[in-house]
Image (cartoon, rainbow, N blue to C red):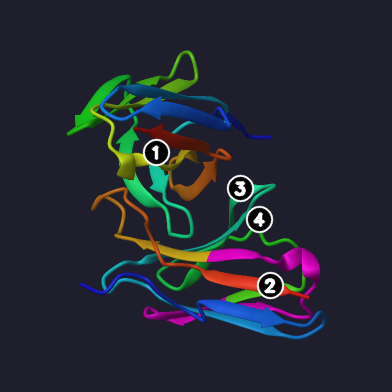
Amino acid sequence: GQNIDQPTEMTATEGAIVQINCTYQTSGFNGLFWYQQHAGEAPTFLSYNVLDGLEEKGRFSSFLSRSKGYSYLLLKELQMKDSASYLCAVRTHFGNEKLTFGTGTRLTIIP
Amino acid sequence: DAGVIQSPRHEVTEMGQEVTLRCKPISGHDYLFWYRQTMMRGLELLIYFNNNVPIDDSGMPEDRFSAKMPNASFSTLKIQPSEPRDSAVYFCASRLPQGSGNTIYFGEGSWLTVV
């Protein structure tokens, strides 16, 4: 089966930096996605990694190590609006668009 | 631009009743996905279509669930008969063709409660 692990909850301070980790053990690998989901809303796309390394997009960066089955999402200059759940998802096979999601990390930003 | 449109947004129904959820994908998107989200199991793919054809329905829980996509702009997910354990948020999502980007765009979801 597919296994994707993330911490259930994290708390961080406004203005600080937080790193949300994701480890995966899947039957194949063809890309890793990060989504943000505010309570009661739809998930929205944040980032995509398919090769090892760091992808930076404004305050958000995502890192991938395929050999370690590991990714992290780095959020800088945290704002109160960053309080949300962050979902890690893996696409396991080229040509199959199925994404397997982790259960998500609920991030709370405190003043 | 209109996003993925789902209806109804909220539905409360009695056990045993038929439930039909509807989705209109973003124009030009040829992939359509139905996901279900619960606290216990998170976000799970039920089925996805490409060019109106079902490609992977391995996530469909059982015969009570069925999905159709009669044309490029409309899809339905039907539960018959519904059971309390079907209570969840059902998301429809769509994306552009292969080679045009990897982003999946989600609708606002249909919140289903079966009592």
Image spot of residue B1 (x, y percent): 20, 72
On screen, B79 above or below A28? below
In this picture, residue A4 sits left or right of residue A65: right
Return the residue found at the far left. Answer: A58
Which residue is the site of mark 1?
A: A33
Instruction: Say which quarter of the image contains residue B112.
Output: bottom right
Q: For residue B78, what is the image quadrant? A: bottom right
Badge nearest the viewer, 4 or 2: 2
- Residue in the picture at 44% in, 36% down: A108
Q: Residue at coordinates 39% horizontally, 33% vertically from top-left?
A: A110
User: How far apart are the two marked residues, 3 and 1, measured between alpha carbons?
Assistant: 15 Å
**Disc 4: which chain?**
B
Viewer-side residue, B26 vs A96: B26
Q: Residue furthest top?
A: A68
Say whether marks 4 and 1 touch (CB < 8 Å): no
Q: Name the amino acid type tagged 1.
A: Phe
* Screen quadrant of the C terminus of chain B: bottom right
- Position of residue A6 measured from the top left corner of the image (x, y, whole percent): 55, 29
What's the chain of the residue with tag 3?
B
Instruction: Estimate the spatial distance between the alpha carbons at disc 4 and disc 2, rounded to whole Å.
Output: 24 Å
Choose the circle earlier in sequence order: 4 or 2.
4
